[in-house]
Amino acid sequence: MSALVSARTRQHEQRTRWARFLAQVLPTPDQHRLVPVAEVSRGAVPLVEECLTDAEIPVAVHEIAALRGTEARFEVLVPADQAASATDAIRGL
């Protein structure tokens, strides 16, 4: 059992070190990059766009590939720094 625990501990330490290393060498994410906040149907796109426009949040909508015979789905994208506000604005639609 102790071999299993020490292996898990070692793996955790390696992941922690690797995460610290990546945090140091990777560039800081751009606050204006687009991040997905929702996936909606074609019928909900105008409602989501209107809601986010009313909240003064820029929005981009990207069609997600749909399987034949299924309804098309759309991904709602907003700037990263406004993602939390956008999620709150469209919650419950």
Image (cartoon, rainbow, N blue to C red):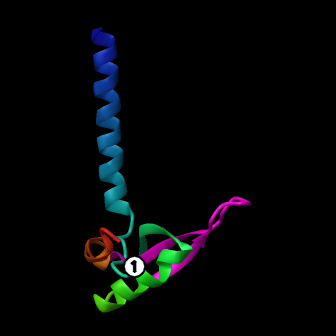
Q: Secondary structure at mark 1?
A: strand
In this view, the residue farthest toward the right is 68
Q: x, y percentage for residue 38?
A: 42, 68
Depth check: 87 or 8 in front?
87
Q: Quadrant of residue 90?
A: bottom left
**Which residues make up the magenta segment?**
60-80
Name which residue lies at 31% across and 91% down. 54
Q: Residue at x 65, y 65 (%)?
A: 65
Q: Position of residue 63 (x, y in %)?
A: 59, 73
- When the figure is inspected, residue 56 is found, relative to residue 7, above or below; the finding is below
Estimate the x, y position of residue 50 in percent, counting from the top left: 39, 88
Q: Amino acid at mark 1?
A: Val
| Horizontal side of residue 64 vs 58, given as left or right | right
From the image, tell me which residue sits under label 1: 78
Q: Position of residue 68 (x, y in %)?
A: 74, 60
Q: Quick check: is 37 in the magenta stretch?
A: no
Q: Residue at x 34, y 40 (%)?
A: 15
